[in-house]
Amino acid sequence: MSEAWRQVGVARAGGVLLIADHASAHVPDDIDLGIDPALLREHIAIDIGVADVAALLVESGAVGAAILGGVSRLVVDCNREEEAPGALPIASDGHAIPGNALDPEAREVRLARFFRPYHDHIAATIMAERPAMILSLHSFTPRLASDPGQARPWQVGVLYNEDDRLAAAAIAALEAEGLIVGDQQPYSGKLLNATMNRHAEGNGIPYVGIEMRQDMVRDPEGQALFAERLARMCKKVTLNIGE
């Protein structure tokens, strides 16, 4: 284990590998983001519900291993290109993050401590036990504070970039669960897909990005229900691999 990542389960070749960039709200004691600590319980700091749903998917056997980001997305956002300003966000949904206004040397230290070890572990896992499919798991807020008029009616979103081999099957499987499914919603994987671009598309591994609506996975009952739905989705989607 590492402060940069946490793994649940054991990766298996030919299985499903789950990757969750924003599964933690942890901020190391030696890092001061300069924000109200209450914000660490909100969507700007963590993808609410993701760590619990991921653990349930591993427990059920639907997923072999889940690799979870070890720190808050406000410490480092691992679903960005390393050189992107948003890798160390100075603002999120209307909230300033003054502790991330770093000089180049301090920025390099932060990336070397968290960003690179996280991605190095994913790469090493894939090399050692190449999965048949990668499941990228995130969650989204029903309403942005910075844009409260924006409608976000979807209960789950399916994201992808150039490799759309599993997208249609995932959408169909989730619609069969009675969910309102967003195709490239609440944002497009063609615009924000850094981790999957690097580790899935970069290795030719089929994948699907899933965004769960946070009000549906805030409690254990909702998390268990979503995990069951995603387990069934994975079973259906993997039938499309190799076709």
Image (cartoon, rainbow, N blue to C red):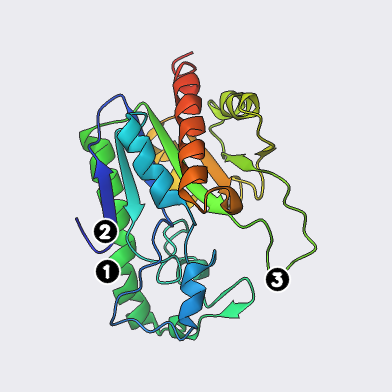
Q: Residues within 10 Å of mark 1 (few under 14, many from 20)?
A: some
Residue at point 48% right, 69% down?
41
Inter-mark Cα distance, 3 to 1: 31 Å
* Precedes in sequence: disc 3 or disc 1: 1
Expressed as whole percent of the image width and height from the top left, the position of residue 153 reads: 73, 47
Mark 1 residue type: Arg
Proximity of marks 3 and 1: CB atoms separated by less than 8 Å: no
Mark 2 residue type: Pro
Residue at point 24% right, 30% down?
12
Residue beneath disc 2:
117
- Specify the quadrant that holds the N terminus: bottom left
Inter-mark Cα distance, 3 to 2: 32 Å
Residue beneath disc 1:
113
Expressed as whole percent of the image width and height from the top left, the position of residue 35 reads: 49, 83
Q: Is residue 4 left or right of residue 205?
A: left
Residue 4 position (above or below residue 57): below
Q: Residues within 10 Å of mark 3 (few under 14, many from 20)?
A: few
Q: Is residue 75 left or right of residue 97?
A: left
- Which mark lies nearer to you, 3 or 1? 3
Q: Is residue 20 visible?
A: no
Expressed as whole percent of the image width and height from the top left, the position of residue 160 reads: 56, 39
Residue at point 33% right, 73% down?
110
Proximity of marks 1 and 2: CB atoms separated by less than 8 Å: yes
Q: What is the number of callouts on the image?
A: 3
Inter-mark Cα distance, 1 to 2: 7 Å
* Precedes in sequence: disc 3 or disc 2: 2
Dot 2 falls on a residue whose secondary structure is helix
Q: Nearer the viewer, residue 123 or 217?
A: 217
Residue beneath disc 3:
146
- Which mark lies nearer to you, 3 or 2? 3
